[in-house]
């Protein structure tokens, strides 16, 4: 009565088995890349500051560097007059040492000259015509309008932690330190193969019995969103030798191989044969709906995943079993990436007892509606907001119950 | 008493003025790109299906195509026997028309042959040895295990709406239709210039009074996250002719020009002079803290924004005034992109009356803490989770009050 699946496993066991193979086969790898191209990558190293920031005591206002004590008693009616002995623009420096009764004109960002301990804002000063004298209209406490060396970041302070996402501000902080390169998690490379005699490339003309390949682009998008790199192998017919050659190439070229199609128990179960010859089957069939004919194997030190040909099943299985493992290889933590939210179920849902079921749902007015199109329908996926999980021994979830939605 | 700012405006007015200039100067533009590279772009066109999906009535199980009536009464103990007259693999087709008493072997995805109206799963069938006879162990209603032509998507149905984000599923849906190219919103190109005599490129050695340029990489990251393309012009000293040349190039090369530095009222207010010569100043100074010395101008039909040199001010002003305008050019809607959440304030915050103030905050245990480092500190930005806004006439927000945080 039909071909049996060997190695058929429960959904939760499949998750654990796949995760453990990812952990066994793949060391977390790093690559050294330019800081200026590191946006959205994840740091592979802790970085400690090698300098103090600011690098020197600096003016945070345009004005005059003074000894604060020389301003004591100054006010809008009763200025103190100081002699201006130099001018420091941003990026320059003064060799002079300030003495009592003197001031130095200074720009925002410029280093405070020796002897000075405050900056009076230009708005509280006035140049006295035909002289080097400056009238100061405000009494300042020491350190006013000065950012002290190291007040932002001390030498030796942790500025980036392994696992941090390189957002614009982290990249800015590394730039402030003059750091040009850093180690980030390497993106795993995933080969994507679509198998099936019925599949056409989008550049081909439709013929009777043929359909356009969906899975290459669908899975490519999912892998990219998990943070992986893709290696598109394209469509291969249900031809043992062609598929075997393509898989051998993929094992050389990439870390992970994802096939779709060619896993059904009927005509053309050739992927299993190829894996049997080149490596070993780990899982053949999962007690899950949709997605039962999922295959997991190992060829040398590379995992190969055979997803169902049906695009809805393929993408659901990808999200359920593969997504987080690829994210983990990129250094991303589960916490940051899974989006779940609880909603009230608008309509009763039935489920077959004996296997885990996944149902696509749509969210309307904060309630969820199951999508009832047949499971192969790409449109149903396109209109869905996420999916819910119905455990093995649950046959029905009633309307009004609160369920957790895994959001796309 | 110091140089005045002309055209100084309130924060909310600045927002409105900048938005209206974006609307006046920039038409929303599209570009035609390959569907397979369109991930995360935003559709510029509605797309209606030109075909029916599925393209033909197709088997959704491996098994035998039959006339349903021929199975009536069949059961596990009492099979019906049908004569197998052909076999249809996925991607192929049968010219034969099924008559009563006949069946055709069929694979998942293959077109249903003429005359058949149901598919019996292989699991409920058995080939009778040395014959073409097949025993059927199940009674089927018509249409069982068949996905009807057009049941997923009808010809003429809307499959993609202008403004939709091209997620993996939308790309899959276009692939199913055999669509190879589509119109998406063009990304605006933003030239980024850092001005200041004190600035060094990360590849240069530190010298007295110099600091590494933060703003190029900081603003680059922000523009990329808004969905723009960047054109890095690099560092230019406070030299009128060099800055003027660089800005003239940028007007040719890009849609928007963002400078930082060179906007202060003190030494070296050269950006304003360049804009005055090449175009017109729209805003010079905003009643906002931090970020007062912000400049907005127009050169030919391009906007030029002069952000403060201080990186914290620069990035805050970018997020407050520029981010959403660039997102709008990419087709993204405000609703999708702004992240705001209410939190309880852990500590009282004071604010100067008379101008809008923005304060960086850190979120701990669902309460927010103001970050008290000085406003130039890149580290303060790096440790902050977002910012709060204190209106012009509010001088203090007390601990325990609920405030809205704009999350980074």
Image (cartoon, coloured by chain):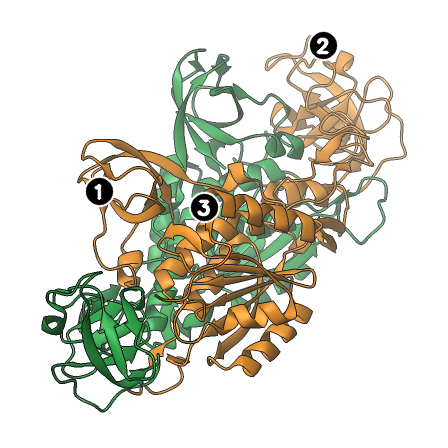
Chain colours: A green, B orange
- Please indicate whether residue A98 sits to the left or right of residue B31 in the image: left
- Please indicate whether residue B71 sits to the left or right of residue B332 in the image: right
Question: Picture coordinates of residue B367 (x, y %)?
Answer: 22, 38
Q: Name the residue rendered at 34%, 65% in the picture.
A: B1
**Mark 1 vs mark 2: which is more N-terminal?**
2
Could you say which is closer to the camera, residue B26 or residue A351? B26
Q: Which residue is mark 3?
A: B10
**Mark 1 vs mark 3: which is more N-terminal?**
3
Q: Which residue is mark 2?
A: B72
Q: CA distance from mark 3 to mark 2?
A: 80 Å
Circle 3 or circle 2, nearest the eye:
3
Q: Which residue is mark 1?
A: B349
Circle 1 or circle 3, nearest the eye:
3
* SS at mark 1 in the image: strand
| Residue A1 in view in this figure | yes
Q: Are marks 1 and 2 on the same chain?
A: yes
Q: Quadrant of residue A186?
A: bottom left
């Amino acid at each position: 009565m039909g071909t049996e699946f060997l190695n058929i496993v429960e959904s939760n066991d499949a998750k654990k088995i796949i995760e453990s193979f990812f952990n066994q086969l793949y060391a977390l790898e790093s690559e050294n890349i330019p800081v200026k191209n590191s946006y959205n990558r994840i740091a592979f190293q802790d970085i400690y500051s090698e300098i103090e920031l600011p690098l020197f005591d600096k003016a945070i206002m345009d004005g005059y560097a003074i000894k604060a004590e020389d301003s004591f008693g100054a006010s809008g009616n009763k200025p103190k007059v100081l002699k201006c002995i130099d001018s420091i623009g941003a990026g320059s420096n003064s060799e002079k040492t300030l003495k009592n009764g003197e001031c130095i004109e200074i720009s925002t960002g410029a280093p405070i000259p020796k002897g000075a301990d405050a900056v009076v804002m230009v708005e509280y000063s006035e140049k006295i015509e035909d002289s080097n004298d400056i009238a100061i209209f405000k009494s300042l406490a020491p350190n006013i309008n000065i950012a002290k060396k190291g007040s932002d970041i001390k030498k030796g302070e942790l500025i980036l932690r392994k696992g941090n996402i390189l957002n614009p501000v982290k990249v800015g902080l590394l730039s402030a330190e003059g750091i040009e390169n850093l180690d980030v998690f390497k993106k795993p490379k995933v080969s994507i193969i679509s198998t099936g005699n019925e599949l056409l490339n989008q550049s081909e003309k439709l013929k009777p019995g043929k359909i356009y390949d969906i899975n290459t682009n669908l899975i490519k998008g999912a892998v990219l969103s998990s943070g992986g790199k893709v290696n598109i192998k394209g469509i291969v017919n249900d031809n043992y030798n062609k598929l075997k050659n393509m898989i051998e190439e993929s094992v050389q070229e990439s870390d992970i191989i994802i096939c779709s199609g060619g896993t059904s128990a009927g005509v053309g179960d050739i992927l299993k044969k190829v894996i049997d010859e080149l490596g070993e089957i780990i899982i053949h069939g999962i007690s899950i709906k949709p997605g039962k004919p999922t295959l997991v194997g190992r060829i040398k030190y590379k995992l190969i995943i055979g997803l169902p040909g049906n695009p809805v099943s393929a993408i659901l299985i990808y999200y359920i079993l593969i997504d987080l493992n690829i994210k983990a290889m990129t250094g991303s933590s589960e916490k940051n990436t899974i989006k779940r939210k609880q909603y009230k179920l608008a309509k009763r849902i039935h489920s077959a007892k004996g296997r885990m079921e996944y149902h696509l749902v749509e969210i309307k007015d904060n309630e969820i509606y199951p999508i009832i199109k047949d499971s192969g329908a790409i449109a149903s996926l396109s209109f869905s907001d996420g999916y819910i999980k119905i455990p093995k021994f649950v046959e029905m979830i009633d309307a009004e119950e609160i369920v957790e939605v895994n959001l796309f």
